[in-house]
Image (cartoon, coloured by chain):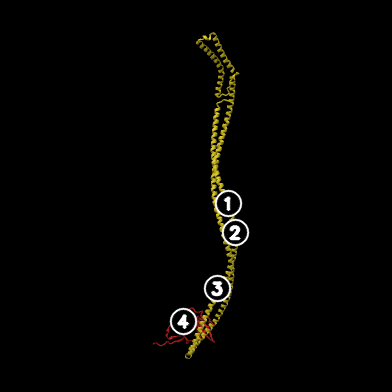
Amino acid sequence: MSAPPTLQLALEFTLARERYALPLTAVQEVHEIALLKRVPKAPPVIAGLLDVRGRVVTLFELLRVFDLEGDEDGPAVALILAPPDGHIGLLVRSRPRVTRLDLSAAEPAEGLIESVLPACDKLYNIISPRRILEYCEKQVLDVFKLAGAENRPATPGRQA
Amino acid sequence: MQLKLGLAFLMVAATTVVANLLLNFLIPPRDYPLSNIIGVVSCDLLIGLGAAYFLSRYFTRHLKALASASRIISAGDLSRRVDLRTDDEVGDLARAFNAMAENLLNVVREVTATAGAIFESAQSLSATAQEMNASTQEISSTVQHIAQGAETQASMVSKTSEVTKTLVQSILEVDAKAQVVNERATDAGFRAKQGGEFANLAMEKISEVAERIQGARDAVEGFRTRALEINKTVEFITSIASQTHLLALNAAIEAARAGEQGRGFAVVAEEVGKLADNAKGFAVQISELAGRINSESANVLASMTESTRAAREGREVVLEANRTLEDIVKAILTTVERVQEISALTKRQTQGAEELVRGIEEISKIAEDNAAGTQEASAATQQQTASMQELSGSAQALARTSDTLRDAVSVFRT
């Protein structure tokens, strides 16, 4: 007789008609976005900046992160990550809901998806905020490095 | 002449008496022998014969002259005359003979002249008869043509009579049909009037329906406005439900972060989230219902607008139909008048046609009489032609006769 499944609370949402989920403990709060501050010359993965009670939160657009199409007309909802990544939020285009998942049954995956969980005739992509943050930081740094190389004056002394 | 013959016979008788007396004297009668008697008688005969001879010589000399003149005249010489200057009967005979020859000469001259005139007249008559014969033959041919034409005319008149009778029958049928048309047109006029009244009634009903549709349209418009207001309210409820959902979500997150202490709070947050979802679901349903009501109201409004327009058009159509019916009534009344006029005309036509039939029948009789008369005229003309031919033959015969007469008279030299 096998042990009963260990259900964990997770935040479920859809991206491009695919189901995604992340552990509820990885999220600090959820905000419906009314006004978003765009960042000039930012990479596409950065949706903008959000003011959360006086605190600036950088939002990453998950559609751009996963390079997906669609859902851009849906409601814009920010998933503010729990500390120590509280200044980061993930922008999704659907209303999330709380669900219980047996994350122990998830199968590991590579890339930005941490694992894949089949449950109730559905397939959940369990995302890893850490991998997403690393990927986005890398994208931002690449853009800023490129911008810095273009803006740096080409003087022989400094170059030496 | 009588006197001379008397004297001659008296001399013969006297000579005979003297001879007998002498003989008696010489010889007594009782002594007479038979031979003496024969001698006496012979002497008497000789004396008589001698007297007769002289007398005949005397008379035959003049008669021979007459006979000779007669032969010359009979040979054709009418100018011959007898020249005897005696006062006796022979002289009278010669004068009478000459007068007769003169008269005969005059007669022959007149006969010759008359025969010439007859010959010329006969020639002229023959020519005239031939001309008349030719003319009569032409007349006969013409009369025959006329007779054929008269027969054809009689036949055509008979056919015309039949056609006219058929025409009369047709006119009677037209009259009967005109009366039927009159009745039907009157009935149609009555029905058209009824149709006009019904059209007026329909127009009033359509106007009433249009007004009712307009009232219903206003009501539906208000209903639609209420549905829009419901929609706004539902949007507000949906917004509250979304916010409640987010609050419940955040509460669940906080409860999860609180661990075991937050388990009961997590359940409450989950129920609140479910309620928010249910409220949102109901709001969506209400919104959909309001949307349907709005859509249906719009459809109803469109239908009502269409119905109002259709009713207005129907009213116009009925109005037009009413005007058309009025025109139809006028046209039918005019038609009735015309049909009545036609009926009256056909009656007059019938009377005229019947008179025409009678006239044609009379004409037919006259034509038949004409044909018969023409045939008779043709026969008479043919008879006249035959008579003219006979006349021509007679004239030619007369000409030949006169020619023969002239030839016969021509033997006389005048």
Query: Looking at numbered disc 3 in the image, what kind of residue is underneath it?
Result: Ser
Which quarter of the figure has residue A102? bottom left
Decide: is A31 above or below B172: below
Query: Looking at numbered disc 4 in the image, what kind of residue is underneath it?
Result: Arg
Q: CA distance from mark 2 to mark 3?
A: 52 Å
**Colour-to-chain, yellow:** B
First in sequence: mark 1 or mark 2?
2
**Mark 1 residue element:** helix
Q: Nearer the viewer, residue B21 or B42?
A: B21
Q: Nearer the viewer, residue B385 or A85?
A: B385
**Disc 2 target residue:** B340
Q: Is residue B347 visible?
A: yes
Q: Crowding near pointer 3: few (<14 within 10 Å), some, many (20+)?
A: some
Decide: is B248 above or below B58: below
**Disc 4 target residue:** A19
**Disc 1 target residue:** B356
Circle 4 chain: A
Q: Position of residue A157 (x, y in %)?
A: 51, 83
Quadrant of the rendering where the C terminus of chain B is positioned: top right
